[in-house]
Structure formats: structure tokens, C-alpha cells
Image: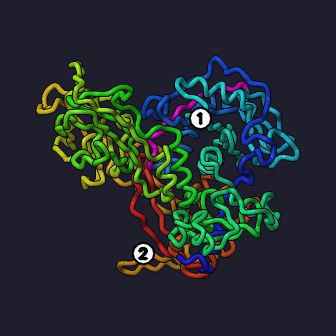
């Protein structure tokens, strides 16, 4: 849809979700999401609960989620809030594709009081809670009501309970036991746990805390125009004073993405407003995650988030020691990370020349190379080929490209070492994997052989890679399947007594039904979606469901615009979404305005395994 189309502009404004007028609280009060108070000690009865463990926390990016204001009777609600926030997060790129890079731990903290301070008004009670969470920027009259802060020292102490995590490899997210809209992003991220939109606050605030992204709002105080920006070219990667042609000519800002369909709807271009100003500064998309909750990150923001997630880990997790020369009679190996929707690219060179037969392999059998006597240099390069990144500098950075180099001396003899053949790290199997996932199975590393991994689905051998299998290529029938990996020594059939790993594959798409308010007229034509005619406002309730446990996310889009997370209604998650000609204004933001005329509404669901359902649609006509 072209960005100048009147319908697109109206829909974008009308579906605007509640968003926080804060990027980094450093722009407001010196710290992003924390009150600077004396550090607190962690409560002795706090409990660390692993939610998702993909590897050693010292070698992963760790998301530590803690709650505040949850009494003992409220802990089931905290667990439900964590589940809902995470399942929304895993539907949003790049978190969806890089889920395997992330460990998630919940810190269950029991509060003597339920709720948090100054919720929802300054006159509301001040509560004594472990994290001292409070609205109004810490109960400050000058603070925005939606600014939800906490005790940074206490948060750090609780996060330190998660063994293996440090400030360098983790991100803290604190949820308040509240149904009031609020949150903040900076060093730490906060969000209310139970608001209708709260699961969408989390990725927005992680955009600030993890991605260093700025707000794209064209206001600071809702309902008050932001004025005109008069400063220099912003440092923000997704704000500019340049025209599209200037961006292309100077190769600056988001010039590589210009003209493409935005992941958040519309086209990547130049849209006025951002950094809390209405005029004089421009952003890449009409509405993306950093402007309107409910939509996805657009491509410039997604590229930054991909870079930041990847920078928290090492693509090469381990490798043959390279501190001294190795013999030409052994196998070199490396272990890489494994995105769950694509594979990393691995290449090998010997004395600068590519080893073509080993491309993609994590092992290099040196005897097979028949190296000439002497010393040689072997290099392995791991690169993330994701299409989410176009900037060559980002691609070449340590976040997305890493190398290991060995000196190989043919005079060195490798002593025999008995290394049992077994699995080491694998894709987690405590949850179902999706039908399009890439499943990996790393093994031990005998010095003179490469263990063989065989794959089976429902007892039938299937072709996979050396250490991975791309399930999207197996053309699975709808339903549940059993994936087995068997490891054996080279030359053995691996059918008896070998080590195995098993996964459940969820290849059944989730379903979603819709319920509309009563139409004036219903039209059904063969081969066409149903059409409903309304003489006034209409409401739509989506009911996503799946045959397996876990939160199922519903989404919809209007007239081909960006997919929009279905959350019910901003003031009540159990109420249906409401469409009107001009939209409904809630807290100075308008929702659901689609204008008179004929509109195509598509809807779908995404299940806990990441499987998206096939979109369906109906026509809604307002007259």
C-alpha cells in the first residue's frame, strides 16, 4: 500500500496503540528505569525459576524477569503475566529468529503488600515492596503518570541470584503487579504486568534498553503537539533531517531500506514526527514498534535489535584450542550458536584458499586435506547471513562475524585421547519446536574422527545437515511429529545403543475465530470472503486457540496494512476491538478508525511454538 494513500494514513492514526512518552528516563530524570536509592539486599525467600534455558548462562544472552508487588497469592498471576509477555515477544522479530540465543529466568519475589506505589494516582497508597516500583516516575508530581520506575540496586541484587549472569550478558525486565498502563526503558526495562497492552510494552521498552532505540512519538505530553525540531542531524539511527534523495546520495541512515514494504505496514520512507516533535524531524515508517504498540519493529529498528542481541553472545561458542600449533593428523572443530529460523554460514580456508567441501561444516578433517610438510594456517569463519542486516559494517562486526585461526604443523603428532561420542548442546526439547524451526544437535569432539548425526522423523530417516536439520524443508503434514537425532562414531550405523535426543514437532497451525457485532446486512458470494455491512460502529473479538498448551497470540490487519497484535480493548482485555469512522479516543490516542467504505480485515494466530496460522479474511463495510 502506498504511504500517501488516504486510507493508509487514517488507519495508521486510528490504530495507534498506547505508547510511553519516554525513551530513556535519562532524558527525564537521570536514569532509564530506576530510582537511584541505596542498594537493597535480595529477599531470602526469592526464587529463581528457569523458564527457557538454551545453554550455559555465561555463554548466552540472559533475560531476567522479576516481579514487584506480587504477594504470595499473586504469584500465579505473575507466572501468567510472564508467559503472556514472552509469548508475545517470541512472535516479534528478531526475538523470534534468535530465541535460541536467549536464556530466560524468572525471579519470583514475594511481596508483603500487593500492588505498587502511586497506582494509578499520586494520591494512591505508597506501598512497601522489594523493588519499590512506582508510577509517576517514582511518585513525583512532575513525572509522567505512565513512567514506572524501580530501585535499581534491588533489581541488580535479585538478578545476581541467577548464577552465571552479569551486567554484560543479561537484560533485566521488571513487571509490576498492576493493570495500569506503564513502563520505562533504559538500563533496565519495566512494564505493568496485567494491562491489556502490557505484553506490548515489553518489546517497546527492550527496544530502548537493549537496542538503544529512541521514541518515535511526535509528542511528549499526550494531547499536546510536540512543536518543531530545530536541532542538528539527530544521532538516532531512525531519525533524520535528510530527504530520501540525500540519504541515498550520502549513504546515510536507513537508505538501504528505502522504498521497501515496511514490516510494520506501509513503505519505508520518510514520515514527519519523532523524538517528541511534531515537525522538523523524520522517521522511517508511519507506525512501528517505537511509535505504535501493536505493530512490529520496522527494518531499521529490527537491524539494530539483531545487532544488539547478537553482540551479547559469541557466534563461536567453543573451538579446538589454538594457543599452540596442532598436528595435521586431527580434526579441527568449532561450536557455533544456532538461530532457530536459519543457519549460520561457516567457511574454512587453508593458507588463504577455501576448503570447498567443508563449507557449512563445523568440523574439518585435516588428514583428508593431504597437507604438504611444513606449517599451514587454517581459519574458520562463522557469519550470520540473516536478511535482517544490510549494513556491511554491522555484518562484519564481531556480533555477526567471528573467526578462529590455527597454526597446523605437520611435524606435530596428536596423542590419542579417548573421547566418548555423545551429544553436548542441543535445541531445547522441553517444549515443542515449530514446523519451520532449524533444530541443532552438537556433539563431543574426538580428536581423530567426526561423530555422525542421523535424523529421523516418525521413525523414518530424513536428510539433515552435519549438526542441524531445517524442518521447513521436510514438508511435514499437519499434526504432531517425533524428531530423533542419533549420534554414532563414523562408520557405525548408530541404530543400537547410541545416544539419542528427541523433540516433539508441532506442525499443526493454530486457529482463530472471530465474532462481530450484529451487522445490518451479510453478503456471501461463492469463492469470496464474507462481507458484513454496518450502519455504525462494529466490534470484533478474536479467539485464537491451539491443540497444545501455551499462550496463543492473535493478530489482524486492515486493508493490507501492518499486522497488529490483538489485545482486546485498551481499557479491558476481555472486551472486543471497536472500529468506528473516526476512531475512539482513549488517553489522547485514537483506536480503530477505519472510515466509511469497504475494508478487508485479515486475521491469524501464532502459537507457542511460533507457527503462524494461515491468514483468513472478511470484508467490513461501514456506510
Residue 107: say if magenta. yes
Q: Along the horizontal axis of the image, is 388 left or right of 110? A: left
Spot occupied by residue 314 in the image (x, y as percentages of width and height): 46, 38
Residue 517: say if magenta. no
Spot occupied by residue 16 in the image (x, y as percentages of width and height): 66, 63
Q: Residues within 10 Å of mark 1 (few under 14, many from 20)?
A: many
Q: Residue furthest front?
A: 374
Quarter of the image for residue 167 reads top right
Please provide the residue range marked out in magenta: 97-112
Spot occupied by residue 120 in the image (x, y as percentages of width and height): 78, 44
Q: Secondary structure at mark 1?
A: strand
- The correct choice, above or below, for 513 with respect to 250 in the image is above
In this rendering, does residue 451 appear at all? Answer: no
Spot occupied by residue 62 in the image (x, y as percentages of width and height): 53, 35
Question: Which residue does the numbered mark 1 point to in the structure image?
Answer: 65
Q: Earlier in the sequence, mark 1 or mark 2?
A: 1
Question: Which residue does the numbered mark 2 point to in the structure image?
Answer: 529
Q: Residue at x 63, y 77 (%)?
A: 595
Q: Residues within 10 Å of mark 2 (few under 14, many from 20)?
A: some
Amino acid at each position: 500500500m502506498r504511504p500517501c494513500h488516504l486510507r493508509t494514513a487514517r488507519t495508521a492514526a486510528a490504530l495507534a496503540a498506547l505508547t510511553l512518552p519516554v525513551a530513556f528516563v535519562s532524558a527525564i530524570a537521570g536514569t532509564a528505569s530506576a530510582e537511584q536509592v541505596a542498594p537493597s539486599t535480595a529477599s531470602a525467600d526469592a526464587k529463581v525459576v528457569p523458564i527457557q534455558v538454551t545453554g550455559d548462562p555465561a555463554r548466552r544472552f540472559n533475560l531476567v524477569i522479576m516481579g514487584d508487588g506480587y504477594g504470595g497469592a499473586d504469584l500465579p498471576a505473575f507466572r501468567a503475566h510472564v508467559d503472556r509477555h514472552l509469548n508475545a515477544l517470541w512472535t516479534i522479530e528478531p526475538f523470534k529468529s534468535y530465541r535460541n540465543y536467549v536464556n530466560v529466568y524468572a525471579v519470583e519475589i514475594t511481596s508483603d503488600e500487593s500492588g505498587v506505589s502511586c497506582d494509578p494516582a499520586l494520591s494512591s497508597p505508597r506501598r512497601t515492596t522489594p523493588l519499590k516500583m512506582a508510577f509517576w516516575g517514582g511518585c513525583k508530581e512532575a513525572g509522567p503518570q505512565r513512567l514506572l520506575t524501580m530501585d535499581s540496586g534491588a533489581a541488580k541484587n535479585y538478578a545476581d541470584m541467577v548464577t552465571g549472569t552479569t551486567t554484560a550478558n543479561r537484560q533485566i525486565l521488571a513487571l509490576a503487579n498492576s493493570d495500569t498502563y506503564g513502563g520505562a526503558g533504559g538500563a533496565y526495562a519495566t512494564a505493568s504486568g496485567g494491562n491489556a497492552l502490557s505484553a506490548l510494552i515489553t518489546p517497546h521498552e527492550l527496544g530502548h534498553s537493549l537496542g538503544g532505540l529512541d521514541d518515535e512519538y511526535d509528542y511528549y505530553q499526550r494531547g499536546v503537539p510536540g512543536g518543531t525540531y530545530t536541532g542538528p542531524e539527530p544521532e538516532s539511527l531512525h531519525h533524520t533531517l535528510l530527504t530520501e534523495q540525500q540519504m541515498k546520495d550520502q549513504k546515510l541512515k536507513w537508505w538501504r531500506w528505502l522504498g521497501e514494504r515496511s514490516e510494520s505496514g506501509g513503505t519505508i520512507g520518510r514520515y514527519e514526527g519523532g523524538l517528541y516533535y511534531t515537525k522538523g524531524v523524520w522517521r522511517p515508517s508511519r507506525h512501528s514498534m517505537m511509535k505504535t504498540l501493536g505493530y512490529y519493529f520496522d527494518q531499521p529498528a529490527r537491524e539494530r535489535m539483531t545487532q544488539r542481541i547478537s553482540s551479547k553472545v559469541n557466534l563461536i561458542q567453543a573451538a579446538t584450542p589454538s594457543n599452540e600449533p596442532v598436528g595435521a593428523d586431527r580434526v579441527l572443530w568449532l561450536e557455533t550458536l544456532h538461530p532457530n529460523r536459519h543457519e549460520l554460514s561457516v567457511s574454512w580456508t587453508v593458507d588463504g584458499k577455501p576448503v570447498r567441501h567443508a563449507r557449512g561444516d563445523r568440523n574439518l578433517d585435516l588428514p583428508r586435506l593431504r597437507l604438504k610438510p611444513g606449517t599451514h594456517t587454517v581459519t574458520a569463519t562463522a557469519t550470520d547471513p540473516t536478511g535482517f542486516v544490510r549494513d556491511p559494517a554491522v555484518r562484519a562486526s564481531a556480533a555477526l562475524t567471528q573467526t578462529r585461526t590455527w597454526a597446523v604443523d605437520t611435524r606435530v603428532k596428536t596423542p590419542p585421547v579417548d573421547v566418548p561420542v555423545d551429544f553436548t548442546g542441543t535445541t531445547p526439547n522441553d517444549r515443542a519446536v515449530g514446523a519451520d524451526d532449524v533444530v541443532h544437535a552438537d556433539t563431543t569432539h574426538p580428536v581423530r574422527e567426526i561423530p555422525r548425526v542421523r535424523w529421523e522423523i516418525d521413525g523414518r530417516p530424513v536428510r539433515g545437515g552435519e549438526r542441524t536439520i531445517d524442518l521447513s524443508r521436510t514438508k511435514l503434514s499437519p499434526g504432531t511429529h517425533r524428531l530423533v537425532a542419533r549420534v554414532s562414531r563414523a562408520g557405525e550405523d548408530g541404530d543400537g545403543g547410541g545416544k539419542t535426543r528427541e523433540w516433539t514437532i508441532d506442525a499443526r497451525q493454530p486457529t482463530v475465530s472471530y465474532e462481530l457485532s450484529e451487522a445490518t446486512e451479510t453478503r456471501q458470494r461463492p469463492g469470496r470472503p464474507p462481507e458484513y455491512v454496518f450502519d455504525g460502529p462494529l466490534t470484533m473479538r478474536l479467539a485464537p486457540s491451539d491443540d497444545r498448551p501455551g499462550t496463543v497470540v492473535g493478530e489482524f490487519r486492515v486493508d493490507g496494512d501492518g499486522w497488529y497484535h490483538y489485545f482486546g480493548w485498551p481499557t479491558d482485555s476481555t472486551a472486543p476491538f471497536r472500529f468506528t469512522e473516526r476512531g475512539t479516543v482513549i488517553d489522547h490516542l485514537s483506536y480503530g478508525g477505519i472510515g466509511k467504505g469497504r475494508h478487508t480485515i485479515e486475521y491469524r494466530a501464532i502459537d507457542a511454538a511460533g507457527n503462524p496460522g494461515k491468514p483468513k479474511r472478511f470484508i467490513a463495510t461501514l456506510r
